[in-house]
Amino acid sequence: MKNANVQIYFGEGKGKTTAALGQCIQYAGANKQVVIVQFLKGKTSEELEFLKRLEPEIKVFRFEKSDCCYEHLTEQEKQEQEVNIHNGLHYARKVVDTKSCDVLVLDEILGLLDHNIVGIEEMKELISLSEGEIEIILTGRELSKEVEDLAGFVYQINTIKEMEA
Protein backbone atom coordinates (compact mmCIF):
# COMPACT_ATOMS: atom_id res chain seq x y z
CA MET A 1 0.00 0.00 0.00
CA LYS A 2 2.37 2.74 -1.16
CA ASN A 3 1.07 6.20 -0.40
CA ALA A 4 2.51 9.22 -2.21
CA ASN A 5 1.47 11.36 0.75
CA VAL A 6 3.72 9.49 3.17
CA GLN A 7 7.35 10.49 3.70
CA ILE A 8 9.86 8.72 5.93
CA TYR A 9 13.10 10.12 7.35
CA PHE A 10 15.18 7.40 9.01
CA GLY A 11 18.74 6.45 9.91
CA GLU A 12 21.36 6.55 12.61
CA GLY A 13 22.45 10.10 11.83
CA LYS A 14 21.26 13.30 13.41
CA GLY A 15 18.86 15.47 11.47
CA LYS A 16 15.73 13.38 10.90
CA THR A 17 13.53 15.63 13.00
CA THR A 18 15.25 18.69 11.55
CA ALA A 19 14.52 17.51 8.00
CA ALA A 20 10.89 16.90 8.91
CA LEU A 21 10.69 20.35 10.51
CA GLY A 22 12.09 21.89 7.34
CA GLN A 23 9.23 20.29 5.44
CA CYS A 24 6.80 21.63 8.05
CA ILE A 25 8.07 25.17 7.58
CA GLN A 26 7.63 24.85 3.81
CA TYR A 27 4.07 23.58 4.27
CA ALA A 28 3.24 26.29 6.81
CA GLY A 29 4.63 28.89 4.38
CA ALA A 30 2.12 27.56 1.85
CA ASN A 31 -0.73 28.16 4.34
CA LYS A 32 -1.00 24.51 5.34
CA GLN A 33 -1.88 23.53 8.90
CA VAL A 34 0.77 21.28 10.49
CA VAL A 35 0.53 19.04 13.55
CA ILE A 36 3.60 17.35 15.03
CA VAL A 37 3.28 14.53 17.56
CA GLN A 38 6.61 13.58 19.11
CA PHE A 39 7.34 10.24 20.74
CA LEU A 40 10.20 8.82 22.85
CA LYS A 41 11.84 12.22 23.42
CA GLY A 42 10.92 13.01 27.01
CA LYS A 43 9.07 16.18 27.87
CA THR A 44 11.82 18.78 28.15
CA SER A 45 13.71 20.27 25.26
CA GLU A 46 14.87 23.65 24.03
CA GLU A 47 13.68 22.51 20.61
CA LEU A 48 10.15 22.14 21.95
CA GLU A 49 10.16 25.68 23.36
CA PHE A 50 11.25 27.05 19.99
CA LEU A 51 8.62 25.06 18.13
CA LYS A 52 5.88 26.45 20.36
CA ARG A 53 6.72 29.88 18.89
CA LEU A 54 5.66 28.61 15.45
CA GLU A 55 2.05 28.20 16.56
CA PRO A 56 -0.65 28.40 15.32
CA GLU A 57 0.65 27.26 11.91
CA ILE A 58 2.71 24.43 13.39
CA LYS A 59 1.37 22.76 16.54
CA VAL A 60 3.55 20.40 18.55
CA PHE A 61 2.38 17.78 21.03
CA ARG A 62 4.22 15.47 23.40
CA PHE A 63 2.17 13.20 25.60
CA GLU A 64 5.01 11.64 27.54
CA LYS A 65 5.48 12.89 31.09
CA SER A 66 9.07 11.83 31.84
CA ASP A 67 11.95 14.28 31.54
CA CYS A 68 14.25 11.68 30.00
CA CYS A 69 14.12 9.52 26.90
CA TYR A 70 12.26 6.22 26.88
CA GLU A 71 15.46 4.16 26.64
CA HIS A 72 16.67 5.47 30.02
CA LEU A 73 13.53 4.57 31.96
CA THR A 74 13.01 1.67 34.35
CA GLU A 75 10.58 -1.06 33.29
CA GLN A 76 7.91 0.42 35.59
CA GLU A 77 8.43 3.91 34.13
CA LYS A 78 8.29 2.48 30.60
CA GLN A 79 4.91 0.92 31.32
CA GLU A 80 3.63 4.27 32.61
CA GLN A 81 5.00 6.07 29.55
CA GLU A 82 3.41 3.56 27.20
CA VAL A 83 0.00 4.70 28.43
CA ASN A 84 0.97 8.29 27.52
CA ILE A 85 2.39 7.15 24.18
CA HIS A 86 -0.89 5.42 23.34
CA ASN A 87 -2.71 8.64 24.24
CA GLY A 88 -0.47 10.39 21.70
CA LEU A 89 -1.34 7.78 19.10
CA HIS A 90 -5.05 8.17 19.81
CA TYR A 91 -4.66 11.92 19.37
CA ALA A 92 -2.83 11.41 16.04
CA ARG A 93 -5.59 9.05 14.90
CA LYS A 94 -8.21 11.66 15.82
CA VAL A 95 -6.30 14.35 13.89
CA VAL A 96 -6.22 12.11 10.80
CA ASP A 97 -9.80 10.92 11.20
CA THR A 98 -11.17 14.47 11.50
CA LYS A 99 -8.79 15.84 8.82
CA SER A 100 -7.92 18.68 11.22
CA CYS A 101 -4.56 19.38 9.56
CA ASP A 102 -2.90 19.21 6.17
CA VAL A 103 0.36 17.69 7.41
CA LEU A 104 0.93 15.30 10.32
CA VAL A 105 4.44 14.55 11.54
CA LEU A 106 4.83 11.47 13.72
CA ASP A 107 8.31 12.13 15.05
CA GLU A 108 10.17 9.00 16.23
CA ILE A 109 7.13 6.81 15.60
CA LEU A 110 9.37 4.19 14.01
CA GLY A 111 10.93 3.75 17.46
CA LEU A 112 7.53 2.67 18.75
CA LEU A 113 7.74 -0.27 16.37
CA ASP A 114 11.32 -0.99 17.46
CA HIS A 115 10.25 -1.11 21.13
CA ASN A 116 7.12 -3.16 20.32
CA ILE A 117 4.88 -0.43 21.73
CA VAL A 118 2.80 -0.47 18.55
CA GLY A 119 2.50 -2.94 15.72
CA ILE A 120 2.70 -2.49 11.99
CA GLU A 121 -1.07 -2.96 11.67
CA GLU A 122 -1.69 0.12 13.83
CA MET A 123 0.68 2.09 11.59
CA LYS A 124 -1.09 0.88 8.44
CA GLU A 125 -4.48 1.75 9.91
CA LEU A 126 -3.38 5.27 10.82
CA ILE A 127 -1.98 5.89 7.35
CA SER A 128 -5.04 4.43 5.62
CA LEU A 129 -7.28 6.81 7.59
CA SER A 130 -5.60 9.74 5.85
CA GLU A 131 -7.10 8.57 2.54
CA GLY A 132 -4.30 10.40 0.76
CA GLU A 133 -5.70 13.74 1.91
CA ILE A 134 -3.12 14.44 4.64
CA GLU A 135 0.64 14.47 4.19
CA ILE A 136 2.15 12.17 6.80
CA ILE A 137 5.82 12.31 7.78
CA LEU A 138 7.32 9.49 9.86
CA THR A 139 10.75 9.59 11.50
CA GLY A 140 12.92 7.13 13.39
CA ARG A 141 16.16 5.17 13.36
CA GLU A 142 15.17 1.76 11.98
CA LEU A 143 13.07 1.09 8.92
CA SER A 144 11.54 -2.26 8.14
CA LYS A 145 10.65 -3.23 4.58
CA GLU A 146 7.00 -3.41 5.62
CA VAL A 147 7.01 0.24 6.75
CA GLU A 148 9.07 1.32 3.75
CA ASP A 149 6.37 -0.12 1.51
CA LEU A 150 3.83 2.28 3.05
CA ALA A 151 5.63 5.38 1.82
CA GLY A 152 5.96 7.21 -1.44
CA PHE A 153 9.19 8.90 -0.33
CA VAL A 154 11.94 7.50 1.91
CA TYR A 155 15.03 9.43 2.96
CA GLN A 156 17.94 7.83 4.81
CA ILE A 157 19.97 10.14 7.03
CA ASN A 158 23.35 8.87 8.21
CA THR A 159 26.41 10.45 9.75
CA ILE A 160 29.45 10.07 7.50
CA LYS A 161 31.89 11.84 9.77
CA GLU A 162 31.56 12.99 13.34
CA MET A 163 34.18 15.28 14.83
CA GLU A 164 35.64 14.01 18.09
CA ALA A 165 35.24 16.23 21.14
Image (cartoon, rainbow, N blue to C red):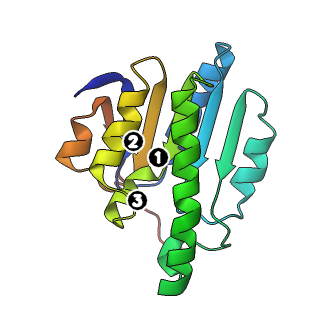
Q: Is 93 left, or right, of 118 in this rendering?
A: right
Question: Label 3 vs label 1: CA separation?
Answer: 16 Å
Task: Please count the marks in the image.
Answer: 3
Residue kind at label 1, given as amino acid type: Lys
Q: Is 105 left, or right, of 123 in this rendering?
A: right
Residue at (45, 35) in percent of width and height = 137
What residue is shown with label 2? Answer: 9
What residue is shown with label 1? Answer: 16
Residue 3, above or below 12: above
- Outermost residue toward the top? 30
Give coordinates of residue 1: x percent, y percent: 22, 28
The answer to whether the residue labelled 2 contacts the one labelled 1, judged by CB atoms less than 8 Å apart, is: yes
Label disc, if present, on residue 112 of the rendered structure: 3
Neighbour class for label 1 at 10 Å: few (<14), some, many (≥20)?
many
Residue 110, above or below 66: above
Is residue 156 something one can see in this rendering?
A: no
Residue kind at label 3, given as amino acid type: Leu
Under tag 3, what secondary structure? helix
Under tag 2, what secondary structure? strand
Residue at (54, 47) in percent of width and height = 90
Under tag 1, what secondary structure? helix
Residue at (71, 52) in percent of width and height = 48
Give coordinates of residue 98: x percent, y percent: 58, 26
